[in-house]
Image (cartoon, rainbow, N blue to C red):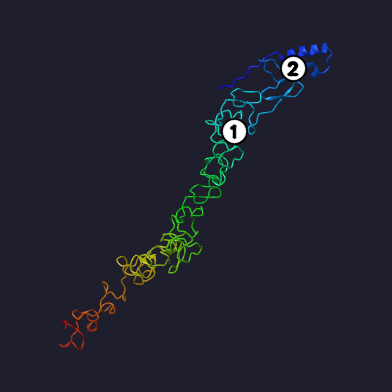
Amino acid sequence: MANTTRPRILGIPTMALALAVGACAQGKTTASDAFGSFSGGVSAGMTATAGDGGTGPSGSSSGTGETTTSGASTTGPPPPNCGDGIVDPDEECDDGNDDDTDDCLSNCVRASCGDGHVWQGVEACDDGNEDDTDACLSSCQEATCGDGFVHAGVEECDDGNDVNEDACLNTCEPNTCGDGFLGPGETCDDGNQINEDACLATCEPNTCGDGFVGPGEACDDGNQNNADGCTTECQTPGCGDGFVQAGEECDDGNQVNTDACVACKNATCGDGYVWAGNEECDDGNQVNTDACVACQNATCGDGYVWAGNEECDDGNTVGGDGCSATCTVEAFCGNAVCDPGEDDCSCPQDCPDDPLSCSSCECGGNGGACWCDSSCILFGDCCWNGPC
């Protein structure tokens, strides 16, 4: 029913004033004398309005010509004429029905959030209170995750945003280690409890020494001891890791074989690797007749005959001693070589006697002109007429 205002008959105050003036002319001195029977009687068809001395639908006569009107209330009883479809002065509205889900309540008060009645099409809920921790907010909207209010018994937190990297997830649960979201105080969070991947179950990065074998690690015993089965680099011990383990003489952490540590052994002459700054050569043997002698290049005068290159090597480079300065053999009696021009007469120690020839010194030095017996006893093996 449409809200309308009931018709009012105007002119009553003017009539009252005329009666009062007439009463004074007749010698009446009080309001009661002036109005007398009029105070309760208005001619048929007239309707009194507030202030005209009558009683209106929402006011009461004060006896002074004024009417008091009580204010509208959402919880109190409705005005006397509430529901008649006519909006009286003490009503905010009057739609002539008892429906509390429209814009005018059954007590003729306009619907509003917090009145305890759900205004259909406008409000999602209305529990009549200002508590934002229950199922219905003070804004008459149903409590939901992300509204910024913690729904008691349902949500643990609600920060009113969709950010998962702060203290409260967008599921209204606290951000905790293992939820898969990087929260305050976490360095990583992969959402699992595996300690052998890049992120530990404590939301810290997997690092060497934490006791968990992570990516790129062969081992991790959680200590700083390099003499056990796992180095501080989280690698199994081995030659070249830079740590001297049992069975190693040295370990310089590299694979260079020309320094002082070769395959985790101290560099030595004969190991087959030339120690830079210390060796000229190293052929990996102890042979002294080849090109490398005691890890030095073979040279004339080193005392070792370089096979295929030297005839002799007497340890010096002085000539005239049987071995020249270039390590070639020199001709002289006593060199154990019967050199040209030498015979068993001139150098018997180098040239043995030839029984088939006669030397200049045989047969008394007569050049073979000596005589001898037939058995060559007297003059050795040489006689006048030739060898015996």
Q: Secondary structure at mark 1?
A: loop
- The answer to whether 255 is drawn above or below residue 18 in the figure is below
Q: Residue at x 47, y 50 (%)?
A: 191
Please tell me which residue lies in front, 149 or 310: 149
Quadrant of res 253: bottom left
The answer to whether 263 appears left or right of 49 in the picture is left
Instruction: Tell me residue 111's x, y (percent).
Output: 59, 30
Please tell me which residue lies in front, 374 or 66: 66
Please rate how many residues cluster around mark 1, counting C-alpha atoms within 10 Å: few if below 14, some from 14 to 19, many from 20.
Answer: many
Quadrant of res 294: bottom left
Q: Amino acid at mark 2?
A: Phe
Q: Residue at x 84, y 13 (%)?
A: 27
Q: Residue at x 63, y 30 (%)?
A: 78
Instruction: Tell me residue 329's x, y (percent).
Output: 31, 70
Which of disc 2 and disc 1 is earlier in sequence? Answer: 2
Instruction: Tell me residue 14's x, y (percent).
Output: 74, 12
Quadrant of image for the N terminus: top right
Q: Which mark is residue 113?
A: 1
- The answer to whether 230 is drawn above or below residue 133 in the figure is below
- The answer to whether 150 is drawn above or below residue 270 in the figure is above
The answer to whether 333 appears left or right of 21 in the picture is left
CB contact under 8 Å: marks 1 and 2: no
Q: Which numbered disc, 1 or 2, marks the residue closer to the eye?
A: 2
Instruction: Tell me residue 131's x, y (percent).
Output: 61, 40
Q: Amino acid at mark 1?
A: Cys
Please tell me which residue lies in front, 150 or 338: 150
Would you name the residue on which mark 2 appears?
A: 38
The answer to whether 92 appears left or right of 347 in the picture is right
